[in-house]
Image (cartoon, rainbow, N blue to C red):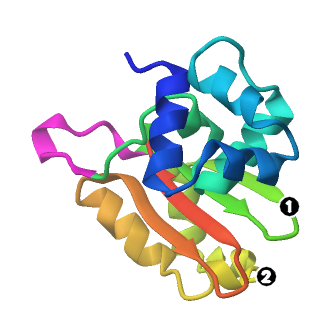
Amino acid sequence: MESFGTRLANLRREHNLTQNDIADRLNISAQAVSKWENDLTSPDIDTLLKLADIFDITVDELLGKKKKETLYVPAEERKDINKLMFRIRVLSVEGDRVNVNLPMAAVKILVNNDTVNMFSGNKALEGIDFNQLYAMVEQGIIGELVSVESADGDRVSITVE
């Protein structure tokens, strides 16, 4: 398994950044970044959040948790749709973080009652057809269904697990 330091160094190189670039963005020394990359020390929690923002990934991904793929599950291998979770994650430019976790049974009720417009306050959620997302899940699509970044920088992801 890849160490945090190796992962950080690889991310930094992928983004064409130097240790000094990272240090400057975090207002720390380049030596601190070097120590992280050599697995001698680790950044604190606040710094992990800032690093994740620099690389436009989640802290989970920064720490090595793999992003779940979007998959088609054949009918004979599917879980009961009512046992799946519908997860909406919104990260706003202002720093707000909203996580909504709904059982698919609740999503079905919202979709059938046409009350899904309750998400209509966020520009990044506008235009997302929740009826279509529900239909995709019924057909066996799970994982990340939607990933959107609005013009003003808000990020939204919708996954089903």
Residue 90: x, y in percent?
70, 62
Q: Is residue 5 above or below residue 15?
A: above
Q: Position of residue 80 (x, y in %)?
A: 33, 39
The spot of residue 115 in percent (x, y) is: 66, 77
Q: In the image shown, does 156 or 5 lie closer to the viewer?
A: 5
Amino acid type at image mark 2? Gly
Q: Which of marks 2 and 1 is in front?
A: 1
Q: Is residue 89 visible?
A: yes
Span shown in magenta: 71-81
In the image, residue 63 lies in the stretch drawn in magenta: no
Q: Is mark 1 on a helix, strand or loop?
A: loop
Residue that carries the numbered disc 1 in the rendered image: 95
Q: In front here: 118 or 2?
A: 2
**Which quadrant is home to the C terminus?**
top left
58 to 45, vertically: above or below: below
* Residue sitting nearer the eye, 66 or 15: 15
Which residue position holds label 2? 121
At 59% from the left edge and 53% from the top edge, which residue is drawn?
55
- Residue found 63% across the figure and 82% down from its top: 150
Can residue 85 be seen here? The reply is no
- In this orientation, which residue lies closer to the viewer: 119 or 62? 62
**Residue at image location 57% in from the left, 18% down from the top:** 38
Q: How many marks?
A: 2
Q: Quadrant of the N terminus?
A: top left
Q: Which amino acid does label 1 sit on?
A: Gly
Task: Label 2: state its secondary structure.
Answer: loop
